[in-house]
Image (cartoon, rainbow, N blue to C red):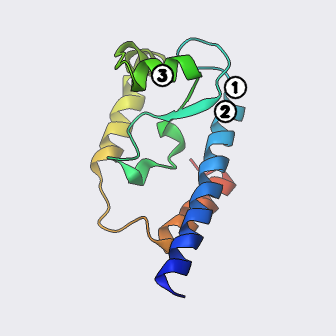
Amino acid sequence: MTRKEEHKLIKKIEKQADTKWRDTILEENNYKCEVCGKLANQVHHFFTKGQNGHLRYDFTNGIPICRSCHFRHTHLGDPTIHATVIKKRGQKWYNKLLAKSKLKPTSFKNLKWYQQQLALVEKGIK
């Protein structure tokens, strides 16, 4: 397989895994925003996938959120968004996820990693 073909396959798997991860979190939370209780149509990564890519498909890192709350957090830097989530989920949840965020794997985001992540997401493994 050429690099170009492998990259194309990774992007396809990534999209499938992203969709399944998002849909699972929204469905399990009855499409309810964890911050304000309105209709959630997005899932926010508590620890960003840019800095914590290994947590991209971790179900405990996904926060069902409405467009308004997500905008307030990502564009206005509203600190009450994360504070509300921590208050609802608890300090134990936060500490466990924080510990996971510090365990940075040396190798991930290759074809094998994406295939494994898709398999786990499809099984709903948290």
Q: Residue at x 61, y 56 (%)?
A: 15
Cα–Cα span, label 1 and label 3: 17 Å
Identify which residue is drawn at 60% across, 20% down.
33
Q: Residue furthest front?
A: 4
Q: Quadrant of the N terminus?
A: bottom right
Residue 126 at what x, y percent from top left?
A: 56, 47
Which structural element holds mark 2? helix
For this view, does 104 lie left or right of residue 97? left
Number of the label disc, if any, that sits on residue 71 = 3
> Can you identify the residue that label 2 sits on?
26
When the figure is inspected, residue 68 is found, relative to residue 42, above or below; the finding is: above
Left or right: residue 71 versus residue 78 is: right
Looking at the picture, tell me which residue is in the foreground, 13 or 85. 13
Q: Tell me, yes or no, if residue 34 can be seen here.
A: no
Pick the residue in front: 3 or 27. 3
How many C-alpha atoms fall within 10 Å of the one at disc 3: few (<14), some, or many (≥20)? few
How many numbered discs sit on the rendered protein?
3
Which quadrant of the structure image shows residue 90?
Answer: top left
Q: Residue at x 51, y 18 (%)?
A: 69
SS of the residue at dot 1? Answer: loop
Q: Three-letter amino acid code at disc 2?
A: Leu
Instruction: Residue 42: give x, y in percent of width and height.
Output: 60, 31
* Tag 1–tag 3 contact (CB < 8 Å): no
Q: Give the vertical position of 106 relative to 23 (above or below).
A: below
On residue 31, which mark appears? Answer: 1
